[in-house]
Amino acid sequence: QLDCVLRYDPQQDCYEKMAARKAPWDCCSATVCGSEIIITGGCSNVTGGINYFADNHDDDDDEPSRAVQYYIVSSDTIYLAVDKLPVALHGHNTVTISKH
């Protein structure tokens, strides 16, 4: 199971492990916004335990997550947003819409 960001080098045709995830990524969604990759939602079955970002905190392995993670490409850093999604999501899509 993927536990980190992978960077692909097309010239070398290989992947390199980058920053470790902060919350489950199974069935999550991601979008690029400026120089960040924003990862939303997901399921707790990747970590196998209580999902503290879920709407209810039982031990359901497929519990959707309210987590928002930001990957900063330039510094190879992932941080977990303090504000959670208003509802738990998994198997969804995310898009970035510019305001200019």
Image: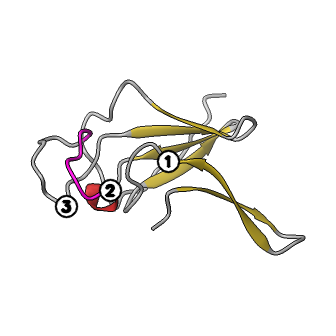
Mark 1 or mark 2: name the one nearer the start of the chain.
1
The answer to whether 11 appears left or right of 9 in the picture is right
Residue 67 part of the magenta-drawn span: no
User: Residue drawn at (23%, 39%), measured in percent from left and top?
Assistant: 52
User: Residue drawn at (40%, 56%), measured in percent from left and top?
Assistant: 28
Q: To which quarter of the image does residue 12 belong? A: bottom right
Residue 51 part of the magenta-drawn span: yes
Q: Give amino acid for label 1.
A: Arg
* Extent of the magenta region: 48-53
What is the number of the mark on residue 21?
Answer: 1
Secondary structure of the residue carrying numbered label 2: loop
Mark 3 or mark 1: name the one nearer the start of the chain.
1
Secondary structure of the residue carrying numbered label 3: loop
Placement of 60 over or under 10, stated as above or below: above
Q: To which quarter of the image does residue 98 belong? A: top right
Comparing 58 with 88, the one in front is: 58
User: Residue drawn at (62%, 45%), measured in percent from left and top?
Assistant: 32
Comparing 90 with 61, the one in front is: 61
Comparing 1 with 26, the one in front is: 1
Residue 41 percent coordinates (x, y) = 36, 48
User: Residue drawn at (13%, 57%), measured in percent from left and top?
Assistant: 60
Q: Give amino acid for label 3.
A: Asp
Residue beneath label 2, please?
47
Q: CA distance from mark 1 to mark 2?
A: 11 Å
Residue beneath label 3, please?
61
Q: What secondary structure do most residues of the magenta stretch adopt?
A: loop
Residue 18 percent coordinates (x, y) = 66, 51
Residue 36 percent coordinates (x, y) = 64, 38
